[in-house]
Amino acid sequence: MIKPFLSQIIYYLSISCALFFLFSCGNNSNSNRDHLVFRYNEHANINTLDPAFSRTLQDNSVCNQLFNGLVQLDNELNILPCIAKNWTVSDDGITYTFNLRNDVYFHKHKLFGKDSTRTVTAHDFKYSLNRLKDEKLAAPGSWVLNKVDGFRAINDTIFQISLNQPFPAFIGLLTMKYCSVVPKEIVQHYGSEFRSHPIGTGPFKFKRWEENIKLVFRRHENYFETDKNGNQLPYLEAVALTFLPDKQSEFLQFAQGNIDYLQSLDASYKDELLTADGKLRAKYSDAVDLIRGPYLNTEYLGFYLDSETPEIQSELIRKAINYGFDRKKMMVYLRNGVGNPANGGFIPKGLPGHDSSIGFSYQPEKAKRLVEQFKAENGIANPEITLVTSSNYLSFCEFIQRELEKTGLKINVDVMPEATLRSARSNGKVDMFRSSWVADYLDAENYLSIFYSKNFAPGGSNYFHYKSKLFDNLYNKAFTITDIENRKKLYTTMDSLAMDKAIMVPLFYDEVIRFTQKNVKGLGTNPINLLDLRYVRKD
């Protein structure tokens, strides 16, 4: 137990010294430039700095500082140009043609030769996306190109992507970090070690990574983006991450001013920071800013429909669970009002297709009648189900457990480590499980794919083993509809089909919540909770 603690102490000393020398050597006027360094802790740690393998939120947030793609999202989830200045789509929806900027430079590296850098060309995108598709690489992000037929670099600044069928959501897929541009010569030199020797085009460049201890980025001096006044981005000189795994320790570091940003709300300190209705407590108002915004994340309980357990097979019991607890009350007591009760379907608020009328409201008497009907029809006097969760969501599951006892249904709550639960859920080893679905891209098809019969787990994300011929037909039809309003109606219909069978229990639609020191400006939020430090300043 002593070694990790000492490592963290040594880290804080070393990073302080490093930043001192970084900004003060030979120039006393720079001796106090802490306002140019953004510091935060990533308790969940990171796995890679290679965008092709960037599958978690924390990996995406660090890769977002290092890499760019053809297109990007703003904080309102509009798809904007990035390295591509503009693009066109053929009338048949098959061919996407991108016109690239000619002033985007890779981070400096000796392998680039005399000038230590070079501009990005269409050939780099051809290499990067073909690398992502390469079965030998086995990148987890390869699925985003499943509908791609091929790539063409027409010249240095014109890049073309051909699909094998129309897919209106495709341009949104290209905003994902998986689709970032990487330089062939650097990737081939490092091989699998590119994960810890990243070279990209992003606003910051890699400086140092001691896994499980610290990560440091420096400002990319040749970054191509500017603010609305023509000032080059980013404003910061450096980003410094720590990896304290304990959230209470993370909060203590924030309270002491040692880190600039808290990126989540944990049960261990939520009541210390927030009032019951989600307001920042007065004692922190002079030192801390609270930022909140919508988050495309649906938290839910799922049922494995191929289970032999009668209670799981019963639509009566599944609906009783949906009707049997007060989601609003749950959010107030367990989340201090952060998040929205999921009384609609699976598609979260903020995405076209969400409809608050297709879900379940709190109707305890109806839940009791459904349980009684199940008992009468099945001859089971004491129905019960085991619900499996990770420790982070134990309080939610215990709340639901207590509420459903009032209906005559017994819920046993079993706790597993997150990785174990993930494996058990994928392999049909748990009857009822807690999970969440965060938007990978900005189209409700992303959410509805979880109900498609050809996506049965473990090969896909249909953990429920839900199968409906009508749903599958509508899902396939959606790919042929380019008009967003017509597609929205179809999405709502598909969501209502799944909800009508009560194959899951939506709990809440999450919110992004961020706490920053008072001197941090320009951070903001976005509905996919991606960290964007381009516009951040520290007074």
Image (cartoon, rainbow, N blue to C red):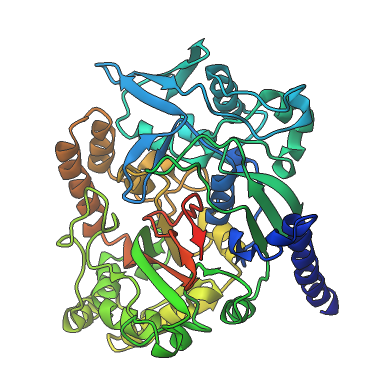
Question: Viewed as shown, does residue 446 lie left or right of 124?
Answer: left
Q: Can you tell which quarter of the image residue 384 is in?
A: bottom left
For the N terminus, the quadrant is: bottom right
Q: Is residue 307 in view?
A: no
Where residue 496 appears, as percent x and y from the top left, is 20, 54
Q: Position of residue 362 (x, y in %)?
A: 20, 78
User: Looking at the picture, does residue 392 appear above or below residue 223?
Assistant: below
Residue at x 27% of width, y 67% of height: 342
**Up-down: is 424 above or below 340?**
above
- Between 173 and 250, the one lying in front of the other is 250
Number of numbered callouts drawn: 0
Q: Position of residue 204 (x, y in %)?
A: 60, 45
- Relative vertical location of residue 468 with respect to residue 524 in this rendering, above or below: above
Q: Could you say which is closer to the camera, residue 330 or residue 247? A: 247
User: Visible in this render: residue 232?
Assistant: yes
Question: In this rendering, is residue 86 above or below 265?
Answer: above
Q: Nearer the viewer, residue 64 or 437?
A: 64
Q: Residue at point 29% right, 70% down?
A: 340
Q: Position of residue 529 (x, y in %)?
A: 44, 57
**Residue 406 in the figure: left or right of residue 438:** left
Query: Residue 456 is drawn in which quadrant?
Result: top left
- The image quadrant of residue 371 is bottom left
